[in-house]
Image (tube, rainbow, N blue to C red):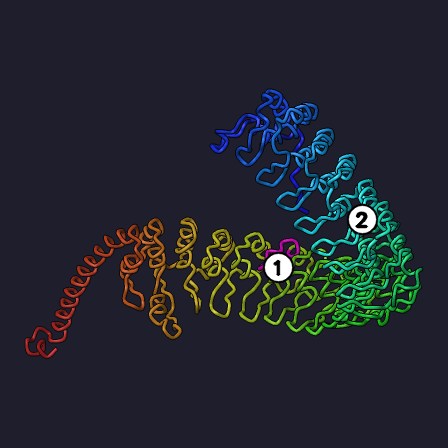
Amino acid sequence: MLLAPRRPPASARPVTLPQQKEEANWSAVLVAFKHHKEAALEVLVDSIPDDGFAEGADGPGVTPLMGLAVAGRAARLERLAKEGLVGDLDQRDNNHETALFKAVAAGKAETVRVLLKLAATPMRPTHRGITPLMQASVEGQTDMARLLLGSEHVGDINATDADNETALLKAAWKGHAEIIRLLLSKGADPGIKTRSGWTPLMFAARDKCTEVVELILGSAAGGPVDAVPSDGETALFKAVAGGHTAGIRLLLDAGADPSYATRKRITPLMQASFVGNALALEILLATGRAGDVNATDADNETALLKAAWKGHAEIIRLLLSKGADPSIATKTKWTPLMFAARDGHRNTVSVLLRSGKAGSVDAGDRKGVTALRKAVVAGHTSIVRALLVAGARIDAHEPDGQTLLMMAALHGHTDVAHVLLEVGHAVDLDAVDKDEETALLKAAWKGHAEVVRLLLSKGADAARGAKQGWTPLMLACVEDREDAFHVLLSSGSAGDVDATDKDGETALVKAAWKGRSAMAGRLLDAGADPNHVAKNGATSLVFAARHGRSDAVSLLLRRGAKSTVNAVADDVGPAIADAAKTCPLEVVAKLLVAKADPNIQRQTAEGSPGMEDEAKALAGRTALFEAAIKGRPAVVELLLAHFADPLLCNALGQTPFDAASMAGQESTASILDVVQKKAVRWRRRHCLCQWRWALAEQAAARATLSGGRPELERAA
């Protein structure tokens, strides 16, 4: 509702005067008026000479007379009026507010009385259509309203503002019973509605204003008790939603229809069940006119379904006693038992199960999900136990093959898993879903260590892998589930620590790949092979170096990975080449000390269509290539110091210097340029020496064969 703005209390008002240029020509009175400086306003108004109140408006249309009205100088106003010095009493500012309206808003009753006595128009509205009577009504100023209504020219008491709200509607909105009593006695119409269709009775019913409800219903023109606003909720519906028990009784006594349904077919009975108002429900049921207790709304939900959703056990007990059917399901086939099981309403579940009318405990929703599964996924242990005791099937499988135990393991509900294993004696610990994953695999994947411990203690097979051959130990390594990893490894039942997946990779390979140094150390302590070679030819060391896992590289070298330091995989280069790209200098140095060959070249790779040149550029690269392209001069110098060949070419015939130049790495290109030129000169001299030596050897051979005879020497 839009009303004239209320002035803030003096303590909350700013103390600095405004600085806007538009105020430069205002009088001090008008500045104080605009900024609600009431104390200053009163002083300034008293300083204005008597002949100053007849002046016209200034600035936003505010007159000195308005300042006199707000200041509450009723006696002076009356004296000035007798002397003819107040000008037009009904002059309005830019908001169409008169001096009378401002006096009402300021709560100056005596000033209002004087202005009315001087024949100020009492019902002149603002630009929003708000009259002084409406302002007094919303503020709860009964004496002010009485003054206005006692005026000879009070006008239409049922006048409406821009929102089609009357003074009575505004008073009902705020719950001002005395003003409502006064307005009704003067003929105010309680049947007029706002633009959205709300009546004064609806406001009172919603806000639990019992006295106002009684006044409106007891008036001669009480208005339609079942009027329907745009939201479709009658006054009775709003009283039920707000828990206004006294208002419900009054409305029902006045003839309100308890079976009325909104556009979505929601009845007061459903609303009372939803909000959990048992007393309101009893009152509605006692009328005998509340309609079918099993009526459904647009979503096919009954009152019982709504109560189960919110967990109102007492409501459910009452509805069941009146014949409510707990087997009725929603459009998506959710039953009351499913709602209660999912949301953890233990008492509600008990009431439904004890009723014996809840239908099949194994009924599923549209996706086939049962109440038991919903409770398992949500982790409601006591409800799971109650459903199992009631006969719910524990061996039911989902379309994807997941069992209840898998769901409990996946979500980390240890207590639920314990109940399932305790109650369900036929639970298959090692059952698999469509991905061939067991409950133990899912628990390890999510890192639920306590569930892992429970399943292992019950005999779950820790060596069983998923469709890709991944074991629980591998999953724990990859997902960095440290607690679950320690439980698996320390249990002694994790199976072969060097078990491989379909790619021939072990848990140690995966730990090295992900840089899990602590896990890798534990695996090595448990006897994992640091030199195991996967199907693609890569070792743990190659994986660690390729992904820049410096700590893992150092660990593997310390723990015996030196024998495969020069292993070359099908799709990656040797460890030294990958380390030269990403690992710190000290890791590269450790690999070189471990006899890593800096001149091992990547194997030829077949590129996909359109990528042949890129594949050739990768093929034949050495560690020196990688360091040069990545712009790592310190690594380049280290490799050169360990006899890396600067003249080795890749499949495109490029040298490391060429590759560095093409990559724009000036720091490494400058080093390689000098080294390459020296190497070329050295190689030329070396080749010349080798040629001369070969000639000498050939001459000696000929001399030996001919025995010093020239014709035989020529033949040789």
The residue sitting at 48% across, 29% down in the picture is: 24
Q: Nearer the viewer, residue 588 or 526?
A: 588
**Above or below 19: residue 246:** below
Pinpoint residue 565: horizontal percent, then vertical percent: 44, 60
Mark 1 is surrounded, within 10 Å at the Cα level, by few (under 14), some (14 to 19) or many (20 or more) other residues, namely: many
- Say what amino acid the circle numbered 2 marks: Ala
- Say what amino acid the circle numbered 1 marks: Ala
Q: Quadrant of residue 100?
A: top right
**Circle nearer the viewer, 2 or 1:** 2
In magenta segment, residue 621: no
Q: Check disc 2 and report its element: helix, strand or loop.
A: helix
- In the image, taking residue 453 as reference, residue 24 lies left or right, namely left
Q: Point out which mark residue 204 bears.
A: 2
- In the image, taking residue 52 as reference, residue 107 lies left or right, namely right
Magenta span of residues: 477-485
Pinpoint residue 266: horizontal percent, then vertical percent: 79, 63
Residue 345 seen: no
- Reading the image, the residue beneath label 1 is 476
Mark 2 is surrounded, within 10 Å at the Cα level, by few (under 14), some (14 to 19) or many (20 or more) other residues, namely: many
Q: Nearer the viewer, residue 578 or 126?
A: 126
Q: For the C terminus, give its image quadrant.
A: bottom left
Residue 581 seen: yes
Pinpoint residue 31: horizontal percent, then vertical percent: 55, 29
What's the distance in space between the residues labelled 2 and 1, CA to CA?
62 Å
The residue sitting at 62% across, 31% down in the picture is: 66
Of callouts 2 and 1, which one flags the residue occurring earlier in the amino acid sequence?
2
Q: Check disc 1 and report its element: helix, strand or loop.
A: helix
Q: Nearer the viewer, residue 235 or 378?
A: 235
The residue sitting at 53% across, 61% down in the picture is: 509
- In the image, taking residue 251 as reference, residue 713 lies left or right, namely left
